[in-house]
Image: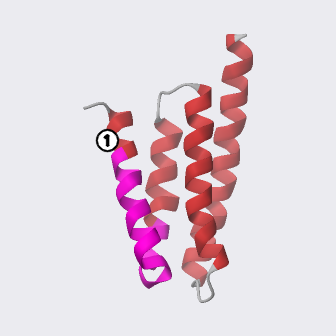
Amino acid sequence: ASSVGLGEEALDDLERVIRRQGLRSPHTFVILAREGVGWLERALMSPAALEAQADRIQRLLALSDAADGASDYVRKSVSSAYRRLDTIRDRAAVLRNEAE
Protein backbone atom coordinates (compact mmCIF):
# COMPACT_ATOMS: atom_id res chain seq x y z
CA ALA A 1 0.00 0.00 0.00
CA SER A 2 1.17 3.53 -0.70
CA SER A 3 2.07 5.98 2.03
CA VAL A 4 -0.86 8.14 0.88
CA GLY A 5 -3.24 5.20 1.21
CA LEU A 6 -1.90 4.28 4.62
CA GLY A 7 -2.15 7.90 5.75
CA GLU A 8 -5.74 8.09 4.60
CA GLU A 9 -6.53 4.87 6.48
CA ALA A 10 -4.98 6.35 9.62
CA LEU A 11 -7.12 9.48 9.19
CA ASP A 12 -10.19 7.25 8.86
CA ASP A 13 -9.29 5.54 12.14
CA LEU A 14 -8.72 8.86 13.94
CA GLU A 15 -11.98 10.23 12.57
CA ARG A 16 -13.91 7.23 13.93
CA VAL A 17 -12.43 7.75 17.39
CA ILE A 18 -13.07 11.51 17.33
CA ARG A 19 -16.67 11.10 16.21
CA ARG A 20 -17.31 8.37 18.79
CA GLN A 21 -15.35 9.70 21.75
CA GLY A 22 -14.87 13.45 21.21
CA LEU A 23 -13.00 15.09 24.07
CA ARG A 24 -13.30 11.92 26.14
CA SER A 25 -10.25 10.99 24.06
CA PRO A 26 -8.34 14.29 23.93
CA HIS A 27 -5.10 12.71 22.79
CA THR A 28 -6.79 11.73 19.53
CA PHE A 29 -7.02 15.43 18.64
CA VAL A 30 -3.36 15.91 19.54
CA ILE A 31 -2.31 12.92 17.42
CA LEU A 32 -4.34 14.26 14.49
CA ALA A 33 -2.92 17.75 14.97
CA ARG A 34 0.67 16.55 15.14
CA GLU A 35 0.92 13.34 13.17
CA GLY A 36 -1.95 13.82 10.72
CA VAL A 37 -0.78 17.28 9.73
CA GLY A 38 2.83 16.08 9.67
CA TRP A 39 1.88 13.30 7.26
CA LEU A 40 0.08 15.80 5.04
CA GLU A 41 3.12 18.11 5.05
CA ARG A 42 5.20 15.24 3.63
CA ALA A 43 2.56 13.71 1.35
CA LEU A 44 3.10 13.69 -2.39
CA MET A 45 -0.34 14.27 -3.86
CA SER A 46 -2.14 16.62 -6.17
CA PRO A 47 -2.97 20.16 -5.04
CA ALA A 48 -6.68 19.26 -4.97
CA ALA A 49 -5.99 16.20 -2.80
CA LEU A 50 -3.80 18.26 -0.43
CA GLU A 51 -6.56 20.82 -0.04
CA ALA A 52 -9.23 18.16 0.46
CA GLN A 53 -7.22 16.40 3.18
CA ALA A 54 -6.35 19.73 4.83
CA ASP A 55 -10.05 20.60 4.90
CA ARG A 56 -10.91 17.19 6.33
CA ILE A 57 -8.33 17.47 9.11
CA GLN A 58 -9.44 21.01 9.92
CA ARG A 59 -13.10 19.94 10.16
CA LEU A 60 -12.17 17.18 12.58
CA LEU A 61 -9.94 19.44 14.68
CA ALA A 62 -12.74 22.01 14.81
CA LEU A 63 -14.78 19.49 16.81
CA SER A 64 -12.39 20.13 19.70
CA ASP A 65 -13.11 23.88 19.42
CA ALA A 66 -16.85 23.28 19.59
CA ALA A 67 -16.64 21.12 22.70
CA ASP A 68 -16.35 22.55 26.17
CA GLY A 69 -13.50 21.33 28.29
CA ALA A 70 -10.62 21.08 25.83
CA SER A 71 -7.36 21.30 27.74
CA ASP A 72 -4.71 23.92 27.03
CA TYR A 73 -2.59 21.12 25.57
CA VAL A 74 -5.31 20.21 23.06
CA ARG A 75 -6.04 23.86 22.22
CA LYS A 76 -2.36 24.65 21.62
CA SER A 77 -1.88 21.56 19.45
CA VAL A 78 -4.97 22.38 17.38
CA SER A 79 -4.00 26.05 17.03
CA SER A 80 -0.56 25.07 15.76
CA ALA A 81 -2.14 22.59 13.35
CA TYR A 82 -4.38 25.30 11.91
CA ARG A 83 -1.31 27.40 11.06
CA ARG A 84 0.40 24.40 9.48
CA LEU A 85 -2.74 23.59 7.47
CA ASP A 86 -2.74 27.15 6.12
CA THR A 87 0.84 26.61 4.97
CA ILE A 88 -0.17 23.35 3.26
CA ARG A 89 -2.99 25.16 1.45
CA ASP A 90 -0.52 27.86 0.35
CA ARG A 91 1.79 25.14 -1.01
CA ALA A 92 -1.13 23.55 -2.85
CA ALA A 93 -1.97 26.89 -4.46
CA VAL A 94 1.63 27.32 -5.61
CA LEU A 95 1.66 23.80 -7.05
CA ARG A 96 -1.61 24.45 -8.86
CA ASN A 97 -0.30 27.70 -10.34
CA GLU A 98 2.93 26.01 -11.47
CA ALA A 99 0.90 23.30 -13.23
CA GLU A 100 -1.13 25.83 -15.22
Q: Quadrant of the C terminus?
A: top right
The correct choice, above or below, for 80 with respect to 39 in the image is: below
The boundaries of the magenta stretch are 9-30
Extreme bottom residue here? 69
Q: Indicate the quadrant where residue 3 lies.
A: top left
The correct choice, above or below, for 71 with respect to 31 in the image is: below
Secondary structure that dominates the magenta span: helix
Residue in front for this viewpoint, 37 or 64: 64
Q: Point out residue 72 in the picture as x, y percentages from the top left corner.
A: 60, 82
The kind of secondary structure element at disc 1 is helix
Q: Point out residue 97 in the picture as x, y percentages from the top left corner.
A: 74, 18
The correct choice, above or below, for 91 with respect to 35 in the image is: above
Label total for image: 1
Q: Point out residue 37 in the picture as x, y percentages from the top left corner.
A: 52, 50
Q: Does the magenta portion include 40?
A: no
Q: Does the magenta portion include 25?
A: yes
Disc 1 marks which amino acid? Answer: Leu
Please give left or right for residue 69 compared with residue 18 in the image: right
Q: Indicate the quadrant where residue 15 lies.
A: bottom left
Q: Quadrant of the N terminus?
A: top left
Q: Residue, x 59% and y 74% (percent of image)?
A: 64
Q: Residue, x 64% and y 48% (percent of image)?
A: 85
Q: Residue, x 44% and y 84% (percent of image)?
A: 24
Question: On the image, numbered disc 1 is attached to which residue?
Answer: 6
